[in-house]
Amino acid sequence: MSTEVRVPALPESVADATVLTWHVQPGERVRQDENLVDLETDKVVLEVPAPAAGVLAEVNAAEGDVVTADSLLARIEAASSAPETSSEAAPQAESKAKSGAKSGAASEARAEPRAASKAAPAATQDAAPESAVLAPAARRLVKEMNLDASRIPGTGKAGRITKADVLAWLDEQEAEEPAIDPEAAALAKQAQAPAIEDDAPGSGSPPLPRLTGEAGRPEQRVPMTRLRARIAERLVDAQRTAAMLTTFNEVDMGSVLALRAQYKERFEQTHGVRLGLMSFFVKAAVEALQRFPIINASVDGDDIIYHGYYDIGIAVSSERGLVVPILRNCDQLSMADVERGIVDFATKAKDGSLSFEELTGGTFSITNGGIFGSLLSTPILNVPQCAILGMHKVQERPIAVDGEVVIRSMMYLALSYDHRIVDGREAVQFLHSIKDTLEDPARLLLRI
């Protein structure tokens, strides 16, 4: 008896998807609900679970193929009727899988030389129990480091194991057993590198091959991912359709930094989340948006839509590219709620588990180039929104205060806006309102 594996229903505005990664190869056994393949859409990566247990007998879409909703991806044979080995079925299945089979073989080749260490026993996800469901980033790390997923506790939804869970488990094992496999330790250290390194020029991309052409000038042609292509399309569309203009101001962050330093430990103990700068900016933006409703509006053809709610997009950098998940109803959220929402978005962006709904909508956006060291920039609109706020690096520099030169912690702010519906006066006043609120955070409590 065979079971068909088909492309699940796609979100309304998504026409098709690209087969990203097969996690099970033809001839291998699968468990029910085990993730078989990742499908990449314009916004999110969808996991396709196995509808039944058995053996993956046939793959009908190779990595890189474009598929539509309900199209056939693979077939699973019941374990009782499937052969124990894949020697007979493998040749035909592998020819259909193409690059999917090659990817699996390459992964096995990388994992084979690694000796089993005390901290990382030689077992893969196949040895995990039925309940061990891994996020895509965690699955890659488990496979590359040849870990036993059944030993790693999951903190995600329904016990889902995230990349953070794998790294935390490795830290515990390293503390208990110093004699960890050097290669595994190196991989763990690389995986724990700060996000800024993941987005540095050239990182996260396949290494350039050594070419021996006439000029000895290496090149590599790599197709854009679906997400990167969509980002490019939207950015160009924003430049083409909106009359974008950017206004700047600077804010003395001394009061916010002092308040954060005074209460950060108590805040974390009380709410279980760190107090960052973004929550101050989100709440200050909401106050300013309530004073200047046009900044919270959007353009629809010849109409202006004024929104009576405040759904703010928070730009998050991930390995796949920039995503802007939406923090809903920010006027009703506490600062702790905002911080928890941002942490959740960052985790999901790294794991590739953001849902389509979390990336849809939004009335205003905030992007923080300061975490990468940017001192000044002109952010591009996230259409159909009509404005976006750019945060930058906090830097000590001399400024004049009451006729004296003093050193203060300053940040440049940038507001890009659609000049078709937002006048310069409103944009400047909006940005000045954010500046006033941040320089006197008590305004957030008194709402003045």
Image: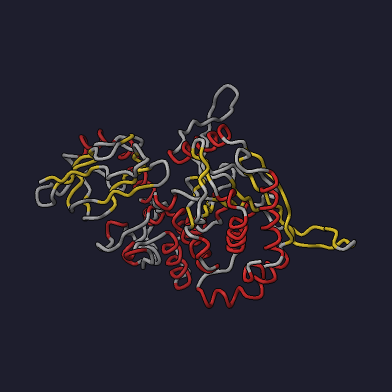
Whole-percent x and y of residue 132? 30, 62
Whole-percent x and y of residue 270? 52, 77
Please report the residue visible at 39 percent of the width from the left and 52 percent of the height from the top: 355
Whole-percent x and y of residue 107? 36, 46
Whole-percent x and y of residue 264? 61, 73
Count of residue discs: 0
- Which image quadrant is residue 59 in? top left
Q: Is 180 positioned to the left or the right of 442 in the image?
A: left
Q: How is the image coloured?
A: secondary structure
Q: Is residue 260 above or below residue 299?
A: below
Residue at the limit of the structure toward the top, as seen here: 214
Q: As rendered, which of 70 and 214 lies closer to the eye? A: 70
Please report the residue visible at 37 percent of the width from the left and 54 percent of the height from the top: 139
Q: Is residue 398 above or below residue 19?
A: below
- Which image quadrant is residue 134 in? bottom left
Q: As rendered, which of 440 and 297 lies closer to the eye? A: 297
Q: Is 444 positioned to the left or the right of 356 in the image?
A: right
Please report the residue visible at 63 percent of the width from the left and 44 percent of the height from the top: 416
Residue at the limit of the structure toward the right, as seen here: 403
Please report the residue visible at 31 percent of the width from the left and 59 percent of the height from the top: 133
Q: Is residue 236 above or below residue 161?
A: above
Q: As rendered, which of 267 and 328 lies closer to the eye? A: 328
Quarter containing the C terminus? bottom right
- Which image quadrant is residue 99 in? top left
